Image (cartoon, grey):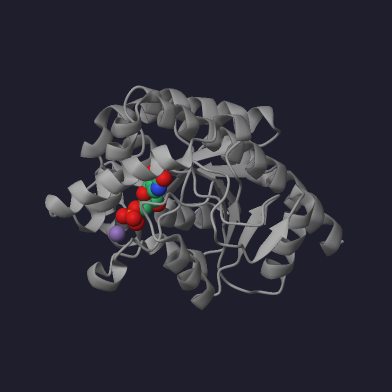
Amino acid sequence: MPQFLDIAAEVQQALRDNKPVVALESTIISHGMPYPQNVATALQVEAEVRAHGAVPATIAIIDGRLKAGLSAQEIEALGQRGRDAIKVSRRDIPFVIAAKQMGATTVASTMIVAAMAGIKIFATGGIGGVHRNAQQSFDISADLQELSQTPVAVVCAGAKSILDLRLTLEYLETHGVPVVGYQSDTLPAFFTRESEFPVDYRLDTPLSIARVLHAKWAMGLKGGMVIANPIPDSFAMPRALIDGAIQQALGEATAQGIGGKESTPFLLARVCELTGGDSLAANIQLVLNNARLAAAVGIELNGVTAKEFI
Ligand code: PSU
Ligand code: MN
Protein backbone atom coordinates (compact mmCIF):
# COMPACT_ATOMS: atom_id res chain seq x y z
CA MET A 1 0.00 0.00 0.00
CA PRO A 2 1.41 3.42 -0.86
CA GLN A 3 3.18 5.16 2.00
CA PHE A 4 0.79 8.08 2.40
CA LEU A 5 -2.51 6.27 1.90
CA ASP A 6 -4.86 4.50 4.33
CA ILE A 7 -7.43 2.24 2.69
CA ALA A 8 -10.38 1.38 4.95
CA ALA A 9 -10.63 -2.33 5.84
CA GLU A 10 -13.93 -2.78 3.99
CA VAL A 11 -12.49 -1.19 0.85
CA GLN A 12 -9.29 -3.26 1.05
CA GLN A 13 -11.34 -6.43 1.37
CA ALA A 14 -13.51 -5.50 -1.63
CA LEU A 15 -10.47 -4.73 -3.78
CA ARG A 16 -8.86 -8.05 -2.79
CA ASP A 17 -12.07 -9.96 -3.57
CA ASN A 18 -12.45 -8.13 -6.89
CA LYS A 19 -15.74 -6.59 -5.77
CA PRO A 20 -16.73 -3.22 -7.25
CA VAL A 21 -15.69 -0.11 -5.31
CA VAL A 22 -17.06 3.39 -5.97
CA ALA A 23 -14.99 6.42 -4.96
CA LEU A 24 -16.82 9.49 -3.61
CA GLU A 25 -15.38 12.98 -3.19
CA SER A 26 -15.37 15.21 -0.13
CA THR A 27 -15.36 18.78 -1.49
CA ILE A 28 -19.00 18.18 -2.36
CA ILE A 29 -19.49 17.61 1.40
CA SER A 30 -17.51 20.60 2.68
CA HIS A 31 -17.99 23.14 -0.12
CA GLY A 32 -20.84 21.81 -2.25
CA MET A 33 -23.74 21.65 0.19
CA PRO A 34 -24.72 23.30 3.50
CA TYR A 35 -24.42 21.55 6.88
CA PRO A 36 -26.11 19.34 8.04
CA GLN A 37 -27.63 18.18 4.73
CA ASN A 38 -24.10 17.63 3.41
CA VAL A 39 -23.36 15.00 6.06
CA ALA A 40 -26.75 13.32 5.69
CA THR A 41 -26.26 13.20 1.92
CA ALA A 42 -22.73 11.79 2.13
CA LEU A 43 -23.97 8.96 4.36
CA GLN A 44 -27.02 8.37 2.17
CA VAL A 45 -24.84 8.19 -0.96
CA GLU A 46 -22.63 5.57 0.71
CA ALA A 47 -25.75 3.57 1.61
CA GLU A 48 -27.01 3.85 -1.97
CA VAL A 49 -23.72 2.47 -3.34
CA ARG A 50 -23.96 -0.47 -0.92
CA ALA A 51 -27.62 -1.09 -1.75
CA HIS A 52 -26.61 -1.41 -5.39
CA GLY A 53 -23.92 -4.01 -4.83
CA ALA A 54 -20.70 -1.99 -4.53
CA VAL A 55 -18.52 -0.72 -1.67
CA PRO A 56 -18.22 3.07 -1.18
CA ALA A 57 -14.87 4.76 -0.56
CA THR A 58 -15.28 8.40 0.40
CA ILE A 59 -11.95 10.12 -0.14
CA ALA A 60 -10.38 12.97 1.87
CA ILE A 61 -7.22 13.91 3.75
CA ILE A 62 -7.42 13.43 7.52
CA ASP A 63 -4.56 14.55 9.77
CA GLY A 64 -2.20 14.50 6.83
CA ARG A 65 -3.13 10.99 5.63
CA LEU A 66 -4.81 10.24 2.31
CA LYS A 67 -7.93 8.22 3.06
CA ALA A 68 -9.89 5.89 0.80
CA GLY A 69 -12.90 5.16 2.97
CA LEU A 70 -13.96 7.44 5.84
CA SER A 71 -15.70 6.74 9.14
CA ALA A 72 -19.04 8.43 9.87
CA GLN A 73 -17.20 10.62 12.41
CA GLU A 74 -14.72 11.77 9.78
CA ILE A 75 -17.57 12.63 7.39
CA GLU A 76 -19.30 14.56 10.19
CA ALA A 77 -16.10 16.52 10.92
CA LEU A 78 -15.63 17.48 7.28
CA GLY A 79 -19.27 18.49 6.95
CA GLN A 80 -19.18 20.62 10.08
CA ARG A 81 -16.06 22.43 8.99
CA GLY A 82 -17.77 23.26 5.69
CA ARG A 83 -16.16 25.98 3.61
CA ASP A 84 -13.45 26.43 6.27
CA ALA A 85 -12.04 23.03 5.33
CA ILE A 86 -9.09 23.20 2.94
CA LYS A 87 -10.25 22.54 -0.62
CA VAL A 88 -7.58 20.27 -2.06
CA SER A 89 -6.89 19.92 -5.76
CA ARG A 90 -3.79 18.24 -7.28
CA ARG A 91 -1.39 21.10 -6.46
CA ASP A 92 -2.46 21.28 -2.79
CA ILE A 93 -2.02 17.62 -1.80
CA PRO A 94 1.64 17.66 -0.61
CA PHE A 95 1.13 20.81 1.50
CA VAL A 96 -1.84 19.38 3.38
CA ILE A 97 0.05 16.11 3.90
CA ALA A 98 3.22 17.84 5.15
CA ALA A 99 1.27 20.06 7.56
CA LYS A 100 -0.81 17.07 8.78
CA GLN A 101 -4.06 18.92 8.06
CA MET A 102 -7.58 17.96 7.08
CA GLY A 103 -8.51 18.48 3.44
CA ALA A 104 -11.55 17.98 1.27
CA THR A 105 -10.71 16.48 -2.11
CA THR A 106 -12.08 17.82 -5.40
CA VAL A 107 -12.78 15.66 -8.44
CA ALA A 108 -9.12 15.98 -9.48
CA SER A 109 -7.58 14.94 -6.16
CA THR A 110 -10.23 12.29 -5.52
CA MET A 111 -9.27 10.73 -8.87
CA ILE A 112 -5.61 10.75 -7.84
CA VAL A 113 -6.27 8.98 -4.53
CA ALA A 114 -8.75 6.56 -6.14
CA ALA A 115 -6.12 5.58 -8.73
CA MET A 116 -3.51 5.05 -5.98
CA ALA A 117 -5.95 2.75 -4.19
CA GLY A 118 -6.87 0.86 -7.38
CA ILE A 119 -10.44 2.20 -7.64
CA LYS A 120 -11.72 2.70 -11.19
CA ILE A 121 -15.16 4.30 -10.77
CA PHE A 122 -16.09 7.54 -9.02
CA ALA A 123 -19.50 9.12 -8.49
CA THR A 124 -20.11 12.80 -7.79
CA GLY A 125 -22.51 15.64 -8.61
CA GLY A 126 -20.83 17.94 -11.08
CA ILE A 127 -17.29 18.27 -12.39
CA GLY A 128 -15.35 21.52 -12.57
CA GLY A 129 -14.79 22.99 -16.01
CA VAL A 130 -13.98 26.03 -18.09
CA HIS A 131 -15.55 29.04 -16.41
CA ARG A 132 -17.53 31.60 -18.35
CA ASN A 133 -15.24 34.39 -19.43
CA ALA A 134 -12.21 32.09 -19.11
CA GLN A 135 -10.83 33.97 -22.13
CA GLN A 136 -10.08 36.74 -19.61
CA SER A 137 -9.76 34.95 -16.26
CA PHE A 138 -7.98 31.75 -17.40
CA ASP A 139 -10.17 29.97 -14.82
CA ILE A 140 -10.20 26.35 -15.95
CA SER A 141 -10.65 23.64 -13.32
CA ALA A 142 -7.75 21.26 -12.75
CA ASP A 143 -10.42 18.51 -12.91
CA LEU A 144 -10.19 18.61 -16.70
CA GLN A 145 -6.44 18.04 -16.88
CA GLU A 146 -6.78 15.25 -14.34
CA LEU A 147 -9.32 13.49 -16.52
CA SER A 148 -6.74 13.45 -19.29
CA GLN A 149 -4.11 11.64 -17.22
CA THR A 150 -5.64 9.59 -14.40
CA PRO A 151 -7.51 6.36 -15.17
CA VAL A 152 -10.77 6.84 -13.26
CA ALA A 153 -14.26 7.12 -14.77
CA VAL A 154 -16.29 9.97 -13.27
CA VAL A 155 -20.06 9.60 -13.18
CA CYS A 156 -21.63 13.07 -12.88
CA ALA A 157 -24.75 14.97 -13.89
CA GLY A 158 -22.77 17.00 -16.41
CA ALA A 159 -21.66 20.43 -15.28
CA LYS A 160 -23.49 23.40 -13.83
CA SER A 161 -24.00 26.26 -16.20
CA ILE A 162 -21.95 28.47 -13.87
CA LEU A 163 -19.44 27.07 -16.39
CA ASP A 164 -19.13 27.54 -20.12
CA LEU A 165 -20.31 24.09 -21.21
CA ARG A 166 -19.26 24.55 -24.82
CA LEU A 167 -15.70 25.49 -23.91
CA THR A 168 -15.58 22.72 -21.31
CA LEU A 169 -16.37 20.16 -24.03
CA GLU A 170 -13.79 21.73 -26.37
CA TYR A 171 -11.12 21.55 -23.67
CA LEU A 172 -11.93 17.91 -22.92
CA GLU A 173 -11.76 17.09 -26.61
CA THR A 174 -8.34 18.73 -26.93
CA HIS A 175 -7.06 16.64 -24.03
CA GLY A 176 -8.52 13.40 -25.33
CA VAL A 177 -11.15 12.94 -22.63
CA PRO A 178 -14.28 11.16 -23.90
CA VAL A 179 -17.64 12.47 -22.73
CA VAL A 180 -20.35 9.81 -22.69
CA GLY A 181 -24.03 10.63 -22.35
CA TYR A 182 -25.82 7.90 -20.41
CA GLN A 183 -29.12 7.49 -22.24
CA SER A 184 -28.59 11.07 -23.38
CA ASP A 185 -27.58 12.78 -26.64
CA THR A 186 -26.52 16.03 -24.99
CA LEU A 187 -24.35 17.03 -22.04
CA PRO A 188 -26.75 17.38 -19.11
CA ALA A 189 -26.51 20.73 -17.31
CA PHE A 190 -26.69 19.39 -13.74
CA PHE A 191 -30.12 20.76 -12.69
CA THR A 192 -31.58 20.17 -16.15
CA ARG A 193 -31.48 16.95 -18.17
CA GLU A 194 -30.26 18.55 -21.37
CA SER A 195 -28.13 21.29 -22.84
CA GLU A 196 -27.73 22.37 -26.44
CA PHE A 197 -24.34 20.63 -26.62
CA PRO A 198 -24.15 17.09 -28.00
CA VAL A 199 -21.97 14.51 -26.25
CA ASP A 200 -19.32 12.56 -28.14
CA TYR A 201 -20.96 9.19 -27.52
CA ARG A 202 -24.31 8.07 -26.23
CA LEU A 203 -24.31 4.73 -24.37
CA ASP A 204 -27.50 3.24 -22.97
CA THR A 205 -26.38 0.49 -20.60
CA PRO A 206 -23.80 0.07 -17.81
CA LEU A 207 -22.40 -2.92 -19.73
CA SER A 208 -21.73 -0.85 -22.84
CA ILE A 209 -19.92 1.74 -20.71
CA ALA A 210 -17.87 -1.00 -19.01
CA ARG A 211 -16.82 -2.44 -22.38
CA VAL A 212 -15.47 0.94 -23.49
CA LEU A 213 -13.63 1.52 -20.21
CA HIS A 214 -12.09 -1.93 -20.40
CA ALA A 215 -10.99 -1.41 -24.01
CA LYS A 216 -9.46 1.98 -23.19
CA TRP A 217 -7.49 0.84 -20.17
CA ALA A 218 -6.57 -2.64 -21.38
CA MET A 219 -4.78 -1.10 -24.36
CA GLY A 220 -2.98 1.34 -22.09
CA LEU A 221 -4.65 4.60 -23.11
CA LYS A 222 -4.16 6.95 -20.20
CA GLY A 223 -6.79 9.11 -18.57
CA GLY A 224 -10.37 8.80 -17.44
CA MET A 225 -13.79 9.36 -18.88
CA VAL A 226 -16.77 11.58 -18.13
CA ILE A 227 -20.01 9.63 -17.83
CA ALA A 228 -22.77 12.20 -17.86
CA ASN A 229 -25.99 10.97 -16.28
CA PRO A 230 -29.00 13.31 -16.48
CA ILE A 231 -30.85 14.18 -13.27
CA PRO A 232 -34.05 12.08 -12.88
CA ASP A 233 -36.92 13.82 -14.65
CA SER A 234 -39.02 14.29 -11.51
CA PHE A 235 -36.23 16.30 -9.84
CA ALA A 236 -35.11 18.41 -12.82
CA MET A 237 -35.57 22.16 -12.34
CA PRO A 238 -37.10 24.80 -14.59
CA ARG A 239 -34.29 26.17 -16.74
CA ALA A 240 -35.34 29.83 -16.45
CA LEU A 241 -35.25 29.68 -12.65
CA ILE A 242 -31.78 28.14 -12.54
CA ASP A 243 -30.43 30.42 -15.26
CA GLY A 244 -31.66 33.48 -13.34
CA ALA A 245 -29.95 32.38 -10.13
CA ILE A 246 -26.72 31.59 -11.99
CA GLN A 247 -26.71 34.99 -13.71
CA GLN A 248 -27.16 36.74 -10.39
CA ALA A 249 -24.45 34.66 -8.68
CA LEU A 250 -22.01 35.34 -11.53
CA GLY A 251 -22.72 39.07 -11.30
CA GLU A 252 -22.07 39.08 -7.56
CA ALA A 253 -18.83 37.12 -7.98
CA THR A 254 -17.55 39.68 -10.49
CA ALA A 255 -18.65 42.62 -8.31
CA GLN A 256 -16.89 41.12 -5.28
CA GLY A 257 -13.75 40.19 -7.20
CA ILE A 258 -14.03 36.48 -6.32
CA GLY A 259 -11.50 34.33 -8.17
CA GLY A 260 -9.19 31.33 -8.00
CA LYS A 261 -10.25 28.37 -5.91
CA GLU A 262 -12.93 30.48 -4.18
CA SER A 263 -14.84 30.93 -7.40
CA THR A 264 -16.63 27.56 -7.63
CA PRO A 265 -17.57 27.31 -3.90
CA PHE A 266 -18.90 30.89 -3.96
CA LEU A 267 -21.06 30.24 -7.03
CA LEU A 268 -22.32 26.89 -5.68
CA ALA A 269 -23.33 28.43 -2.36
CA ARG A 270 -25.03 31.46 -3.95
CA VAL A 271 -27.02 29.38 -6.44
CA CYS A 272 -28.09 27.16 -3.56
CA GLU A 273 -29.20 30.18 -1.46
CA LEU A 274 -30.95 31.92 -4.33
CA THR A 275 -32.98 28.87 -5.35
CA GLY A 276 -33.76 27.78 -1.80
CA GLY A 277 -34.42 24.19 -0.88
CA ASP A 278 -35.39 23.09 -4.38
CA SER A 279 -31.91 23.13 -5.83
CA LEU A 280 -30.50 21.33 -2.80
CA ALA A 281 -33.12 18.59 -3.10
CA ALA A 282 -32.32 18.26 -6.81
CA ASN A 283 -28.59 18.18 -6.05
CA ILE A 284 -29.03 15.37 -3.52
CA GLN A 285 -31.17 13.31 -5.88
CA LEU A 286 -28.77 13.59 -8.80
CA VAL A 287 -25.85 12.44 -6.65
CA LEU A 288 -27.84 9.40 -5.52
CA ASN A 289 -28.70 8.71 -9.16
CA ASN A 290 -24.99 8.88 -10.05
CA ALA A 291 -24.08 6.56 -7.18
CA ARG A 292 -26.50 3.95 -8.58
CA LEU A 293 -25.07 4.17 -12.09
CA ALA A 294 -21.48 4.09 -10.81
CA ALA A 295 -22.20 0.92 -8.82
CA ALA A 296 -23.78 -0.70 -11.89
CA VAL A 297 -20.84 0.25 -14.12
CA GLY A 298 -18.40 -1.01 -11.47
CA ILE A 299 -20.13 -4.39 -11.37
CA GLU A 300 -20.12 -4.71 -15.17
CA LEU A 301 -16.49 -3.56 -15.43
CA ASN A 302 -15.36 -6.31 -13.07
CA GLY A 303 -17.32 -8.83 -15.14
CA VAL A 304 -15.90 -7.64 -18.47
CA THR A 305 -12.35 -7.46 -17.15
CA ALA A 306 -12.52 -10.97 -15.69
CA LYS A 307 -13.95 -12.47 -18.91
CA GLU A 308 -11.53 -10.84 -21.31
CA PHE A 309 -8.43 -11.72 -19.36
CA ILE A 310 -9.34 -15.41 -19.03
N1 PSU B 1 -19.47 21.48 -9.17
C1 PSU B 1 -20.58 21.14 -8.48
N2 PSU B 1 -20.46 20.74 -7.18
C2 PSU B 1 -19.24 20.65 -6.56
C3 PSU B 1 -18.07 20.99 -7.31
C4 PSU B 1 -18.23 21.40 -8.59
O1 PSU B 1 -21.67 21.21 -9.02
O2 PSU B 1 -19.18 20.27 -5.37
C5 PSU B 1 -16.72 20.87 -6.65
C6 PSU B 1 -16.05 19.55 -7.03
O3 PSU B 1 -15.28 19.10 -5.93
C7 PSU B 1 -15.13 19.95 -8.16
C8 PSU B 1 -14.68 21.31 -7.68
O4 PSU B 1 -14.04 19.07 -8.36
O5 PSU B 1 -15.85 21.90 -7.14
C9 PSU B 1 -14.09 22.15 -8.79
O6 PSU B 1 -13.48 23.28 -8.25
P1 PSU B 1 -12.52 24.18 -9.16
O7 PSU B 1 -13.42 24.78 -10.21
O8 PSU B 1 -11.93 25.20 -8.25
O9 PSU B 1 -11.50 23.24 -9.74
MN1 MN C 1 -10.72 27.52 -10.88
The front one of 224 and 168 is: 168
**Residue 190 in view here:** yes
The front one of 223 and 175 is: 175
Query: What percent of the width, then of the height, locates residue 98?
Result: 24, 54
**Residue in the image at 70% along x and 47% along y:** 297
Query: What percent of the width, then of the height, locates residue 109?
Result: 40, 55
**Residue in the image at 49% along x and 38% along y:** 69
> Does residue 142 lie above or below 239 as drawn?
below
Query: What percent of the width, then of the height, locates residue 192?
Result: 52, 43
The front one of 96 and 255 is: 255
The front one of 221 and 70 is: 221
From the viewer's perspective, is 265 left or right of 216? left
From the viewer's perspective, is 182 left or right of 26? right
Tell me where residue 108 sits by quadrant.
Answer: bottom left
Ligand 2's quadrant is bottom left
Query: What percent of the width, then of the height, locates residue 164?
Result: 40, 61
Q: Quadrant of the C terminus?
A: bottom right
**Residue in the image at 33% along x and 61% along y:** 132
Report how many numbered discs are placed on residues in the image: 0
From the viewer's perspective, is 304 left or right of 175? right
